[in-house]
Amino acid sequence: MNDVLEAISPATSLSGPATCVSKVELRVSCKGLLDRDTLNKSDPCVILMVQNNGQWTELDRTEVIKSNLHPVFAKVFSWDYYFEEVQKLRIEVYDIHGTHSIGTRDDDFLGGMECTLGQIVAQKRMVKPLLLKYGKYAGKSTITVHAEEISGNNGYVELSFCAKKLDDKDIFSKSDPFLEIYRINDDLSEQLVHRTEVIKNNLNPVWEPFKVSLISLCSCDAERKLKCLVWDYDSRGKHDFIGEFYATFRDMQNISSGNKVTWDCVNPKYKLKKRNYKNSGVVILSNLKVAIDFTASNGDPRNSCSLHYINPYQPNEYLKALIAVGEICQDYDSDKRFSALGFGARIPPNYEVSHDFAINFNPEDDECEEIQGVVEAYQNCLPKIQLYGPTNVSPIINRIAKLAAGDGNIEDASRYHILLILTDGVVTDMADTREAIVRGAYQPLSIIIVGVGNADFTDMQILDGDDGVLRSPKGEPVLRDIVQFVPFRDFKTSPDKSSCSLSPLQASPAALAKCVLAEVPKQVVEYYSHRAISPMCPISESLTPVLTPIATTPTK
């Protein structure tokens, strides 16, 4: 046996009712709305409805935008996202007259559309035509829904803006200013982040503080440009432009106790035409507060109810299983260096979902010094990633099988790999996993699966060939039994005394290791017998195990 490979996915799946893994922020805009008004344009408002037990109920609604057929709404819909559920939603657009009540004869229906939250999340930007009753198209009207997931340790920031000496755009009164902030995306498109309230008749407005997620504000990129516009409000929708400025979140962070960050509010046309033009006022960031929010993730390792909770006094169940099996395999490894991999998490710097990453964040050298090094890498990794899903195991199995295939060309019995999978839920790519195991059986590889937590592991028994021959989705039988599955809870020796059902319990590491490793010698012999390779003479570095522990991702 050669290296010990550790693959740890730090996400968490809870048994019982579906648990929200992330919150989704939805932003809505429309184009080409029907004009229902005689003298002015429609005053649109969007209603978000969800389906519960076959009935549509209103979840929330946007603000009303006066006299606008191409509205970009500032309202952000926040909704819990469950990956494994079909969450149906309906979006309706109305022309509002006088009051905000929906359903009176004075309110004109401008169209609607139905979809699922999963469809919007998958596309990130969904554009659909608006339909009237009986499926008739509402002219060329369209609605665009942008989705951004707020999960893990995304930060939230509270911003307080004010302005001084803004240009006066009104003849008989002072300007009625409001501020808009747009995020400039990688494709140079602009996404509305926030629109403040209108301050009437005031050239020195102080806008209300507002809270926004960092993923929405700047995609968690402190250097991303933000375009900020100041307008003089007009009830007919023809707002007068006062000026603009560009900022970054890095600029905003320069604020300190007693100091404020200031930008010149510039009208480019005035700057070109007027020789002595300086600005059309100044905009001031008077206060900034940052808070880290972990509520979107049910597996926060700082929460004592998480299976990944880092208890300063005793290891959690993942670490118990890892140490129990790893320390035995470690004795057979020549260099005592173990590859440690993870899956099912959003990883820095871009926080994209990965099902195959080095938990030391070094893809060029994913090995750790001894099992203790794997433990330390696991503990250091958890605060830096965002727990996610789904629980896809096949990418890791395929990776290790490919690695083992290279060793299969060696014409002696000197190398064998053990893949240790630590999972707190049933894998979601079962068909691909079965295929990967059937393919992997031709390589010098054994797979140990330890179920952590209180989930229902019934389906996991399919992967263990003890009750029958495992077959690929196409019916091909596995060449040899290479999988051993055991639930960790079977090795607990004391009842849970705490109020949290997921808190770590005392277990018997020796009994666990004995059980999961019992079939490995037989599997090694079967592989080399199939290859007609005789055993090597016993020397000190003849056998080194490859161990890869993997944890699971959270259900949504």
Image: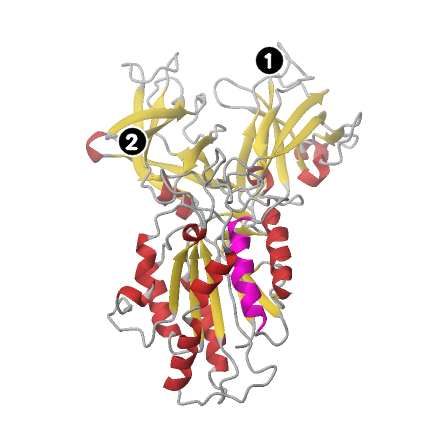
Q: Residue furthest left?
A: 134
Amino acid on which the number 1 mark rests in the picture: Lys
Magenta segment boundaries in residue numbering: 316-331
Rate crowding at label 2 as few (under 14), some (14 to 19) or many (20 or more) other CA atoms within 10 Å: some
Asked if residue 241 is positioned above or below residue 351 in the image, the reply reads above
Amino acid on which the number 2 mark rests in the picture: Gln
Asked if residue 260 is positioned above or below residue 168 in the image, the reply reads below
Rate crowding at label 1 as few (under 14), some (14 to 19) or many (20 or more) other CA atoms within 10 Å: some
Q: Residue furthest front?
A: 493
Task: Point out residue 417 in the picture as x, y percentages from the top left corner.
Answer: 49, 73
Q: Name the mark nearer the viewer: 1 or 2.
A: 2
Q: Can residue 8 be seen in this view?
A: no
Mark 1–mark 2 CB contact (< 8 Å) = no
Q: SS of the residue at dot 1?
A: loop
The answer to which of 57 and 415 lies nearer the viewer is 415
Q: Name the residue under label 1.
A: 200
**In the rendered view of the protein, which quadrant contains the C terminus?**
top left
Asked if residue 320 is among those painted magenta in the image, a careful observer would answer yes
Q: Mark 2 points at which residue?
A: 51
Task: Point out residue 381 in the picture as x, y percentages from the top left corner.
Answer: 60, 52
Using the image, tell me which numbered label, if any, was put on residue 213. Answer: none
User: Which residue is drawn at the image coordinates 41% and 81% (left, top)?
Assistant: 525
